[in-house]
Amino acid sequence: MATKIIYFVRHGETANNALHIKQGPEGPLSVKGREQALATAKRFPKGWRGKPELIVSSPYERTKETAEIIARELHMKVRYSDLLAERKNPSGIVGHDAGDLEVRKVLDKIDKSYHEDDLRIADEENFTDLKKRAKKLLGYISRRYASRIIMVTHSRFLKMIISYMQYGDKLTASQYNTLSFFNKIDNAGMAICTYKHHWLKKNEWKLIVWNDLD
């Protein structure tokens, strides 16, 4: 039986995070965000015993910058994967304040009310799309040789990863939205998970720590 430890790290703060502006792929870290990323980097062990072996990051600007700060501190290189990207927002709300009435109406339909799993408002990545990508990511992790992995990603998608770990293919949009609403993940917050590979029974994913900042 083999066990992997996966450190999922949300990117550091951006200026748009602080202003509650809906984001696309662009946008660097703020000064505070870079400080958060460095503080997270310093938490990882650097000796051969316990040091992470692999860093994989979303290719978005804010995650790349976060991952590169961590990698410099650990003297490692970063790999990039689109599997770790944030949920694609409807293009009509990108760059707009999340509190705007029209933006709020869209977000309420997607995030806060019960809806069918295949609901699509516009050109966004919907629940079904996101669930399929989470499943692919877990398959990707299970095939890595490394046993200690850092994955730098985003709030919405990280919540989907954990939701899929809990419910698997039975996960519904309602279950995901409930988990997402009640479980905040701060900038540079960490979710620590384990993956155990069993030869004779179902493989096991387990969430050990959520939103760890200390």
Image (cartoon, rainbow, N blue to C red):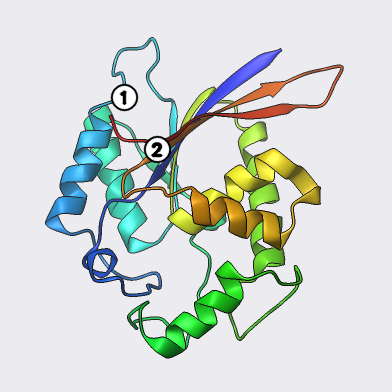
- State the residue position of label 2: 190
Asked if residue 89 lies left or right of residue 178, the reply is left
* Foreground of the two, 64 or 108: 108
- Which mark is on residue 44? 1
Mark 2 → mark 1, Cα distance in angstroms: 12 Å
Q: Are marks 2 and 1 in contact (CB under 8 Å)?
A: no
Which numbered tag is attached to residue 76?
none
Residue 9 visible in this rendered orientation of the protein: yes
Quarter of the rendering occupied by the N terminus: top right
Q: Is residue 194 above or below residue 122?
A: above
Quarter occupied by residue 172: bottom right
Counting residues from the start of the chain, the first of labels 2 and 1 encountered is 1
| Amino acid type assigned to the residue bearing label 2 in the image | Met
Q: Quadrant of residue 176?
A: bottom right
Q: Looking at this rendering, what residue extends furthest in the left direction? A: 31
In this view, 198 is above or below 101:
above
116 vs 44: above or below:
below
Residue 117: which quarter of the image? bottom right
Quadrant where the C terminus sits is: top left
Dot 1 falls on a residue whose secondary structure is loop
Residue at 67 percent across and 40 percent down: it is 165
